[in-house]
Image (cartoon, rainbow, N blue to C red):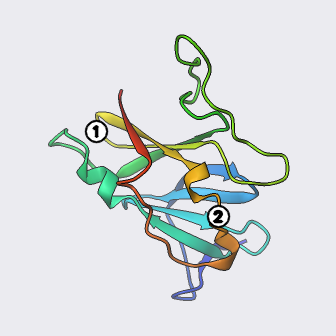
């Protein structure tokens, strides 16, 4: 199945770092700061999030583009990580299909990993929209690598 951008009616290539989250495929577009959200049934891109604001917050002068995404159902716990000392992170994954958890974002030569709380976009339904600029300045928690 081809992944198609309905705005251009063209195939979207260079998909990288793919995660299946809440029934949608999230993928970084290689060599860009974009994350696309794909309807797996149709292959249509239903949203495109621009992470340029996050890239601008990276302090390493040699930074390159976004090239790493991961999902965890528990906020505050990085992929493969343990809960913070003194207690676990908040779990907001909901079996009813409500959005929750965290999307962790980093890039080539980034000295930072960002946590985006997906509950911040809980009211957002990617099946009903095409383009959304990520609110990278809000709700993004910066962590040193």
Residue at disc 1, secondary structure: loop
Q: Position of residue 15 (x, y in %)?
A: 53, 60
Residue at x-position 79% and y-position 70%:
41
Q: Where does residue 117 sit, x and y in percent of width and height?
A: 54, 46
The quadrant in which the N terminus is found is bottom right
Q: Residues within 10 Å of mark 1 (few under 14, many from 20)?
A: some
Q: Which residue is mark 1?
A: 109
Q: Nearer the viewer, residue 82 or 10?
A: 82
Q: Secondary structure at mark 2?
A: loop
- The answer to whether residue 6 is above or below residue 80 is below
Which residue occupies the foreground of this view, 50 or 87? 87
**Residue 109 placement, left or right of 74:** left
| Residue 140 at x, y percent in the picture | 41, 46
Please say if the residues under marks 2 and 1 sit with CB atoms less than 8 Å apart. Answer: no
Up-down: is 20 above or below 43? above
Q: Which residue is mark 2?
A: 123
Give above or below for 111 relative to 98. above
Crowding near pointer 2: few (<14 within 10 Å), some, many (20+)? few
Q: Image quarter for residue 27?
A: bottom right
Q: Residue at x 56, y 41 (%)?
A: 70
Between 36 and 116, the residue placed more toward the observer is: 116
Comparing labels 2 and 1, the label whose residue is closer to the camera: 2
Distance of label 2 from label 1 (alpha carbons) = 33 Å
Question: Quick one: which residue is furthest to the left in this view?
Answer: 61
Q: Earlier in the sequence, mark 2 or mark 1?
A: 1
């Amino acid at each position: 199945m081809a992944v198609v951008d309905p705005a251009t009616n063209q195939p979207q290539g260079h998909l990288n770092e793919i995660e299946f989250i809440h029934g949608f495929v999230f993928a970084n577009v290689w060599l860009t700061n974009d994350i696309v959200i794909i309807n797996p049934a149709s292959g249509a891109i239903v949203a495109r999030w621009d992470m340029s604001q996050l890239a601008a917050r990276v302090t390493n002068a040699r930074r390159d583009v976004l090239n790493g995404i991961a999902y965890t159902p528990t906020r505050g716990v990085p992929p493969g990580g343990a809960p913070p000392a003194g207690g676990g992170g908040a779990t907001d994954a909901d079996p009813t299909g409500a959005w929750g958890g965290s999307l962790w974002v980093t890039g080539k030569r980034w000295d930072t990993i960002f946590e985006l709380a997906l509950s911040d976009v809980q009211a957002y339904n990617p099946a009903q929209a095409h383009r959304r600029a990520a609110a990278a300045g809000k709700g993004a928690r910066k962590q040193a690598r």
